[in-house]
Amino acid sequence: MNPAQPETIQPTALGGPRPLLAGSLPNGPAAAAILSTGAGCAFLGIIGFVADASKSIANCLTFYRPTGPLSGVTTVAILLWLVLWFVLARRWRLKDVAVGKINAAALVLLALGILLTFPPFADLLQGK
């Protein structure tokens, strides 16, 4: 192999880390931010959906009574988003990942979060 020509690296599974080429800037931290944001949106939708479907979970998520379970739903979703972002950023800090696959996964998670926070769709799933 010619030392002046960098070796090509095939992408691995969904966002799987690849070795970083010498002199290149890793895209792992940016990919971690993108994927964790999509997952945070999905967390918000899922937790909101579950809180709406279950009175006992809604009561557990009522951190501030005037706002009801919304206070806990948003707080828990934000905490999960931040923890996931921290974990992914640490794992991928020196890695080069497949950003296209990360973006696609983030968009799917974003769509899930939006659908689950849309009352007619959530009511349909709950049979209301």
Image: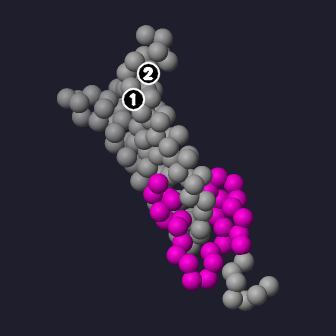
Residue 54 visible within the image: no
- For the view shown, which residue lies furthest in the bottom direction? 3
Residue at 61%, 59% (x, y): give it.
98
Figure colour scheme: one colour
Q: CB of mark 2 within 8 Å of CB of mark 1?
A: yes
| Amino acid type for the residue under numbered disc 1 | Thr
Secondary structure, mark 2, is helix
Q: Determine the residue positioned at 23% across, 30% down.
A: 67
The local secondary structure at tag 1 comes to helix
Residue behind mark 1: 117
The location of residue 37, given as percent across then percent down, is: 44, 49
Amino acid at the residue labelled 2: Ala
Nearest to N terminus: mark 2 or mark 1: 1
Q: Quadrant of the N terminus?
A: bottom right
Q: Is residue 60 above or below residue 6?
A: above
Badge 2 crowding class, 10 Å Cα cut-off, few under 14, some 14 to 19, many 20 or more, is many
Q: Nearer the viewer, residue 69 or 112?
A: 112
Number of residues whose C-alpha sits closer than 10 Å to that of mark 1, classed few (under 14), some (14–19) or many (20 or more): many
Does the magenta-highlighted stretch encompass residue 16? Answer: yes
Q: Main secondary structure of the magenta part?
A: loop
Whether residue 6 sits left or right of residue 37 in the image: it is right
* Disc 2: which residue: 122
Image x and y of residue 29, in percent:
49, 65
| Residue 91 higher or lower than 22, as above or below | above
Q: Residue at x 52, y 67 (%)?
A: 27
Magenta segment range?
A: 8-34
Horizontal and vertical percent for residue 4? Answer: 69, 89
Q: Quadrant of residue 48?
A: top left
- Is the residue 112 above or below the residue 16 in the image? above
Residue 51 x %, y %: 40, 26
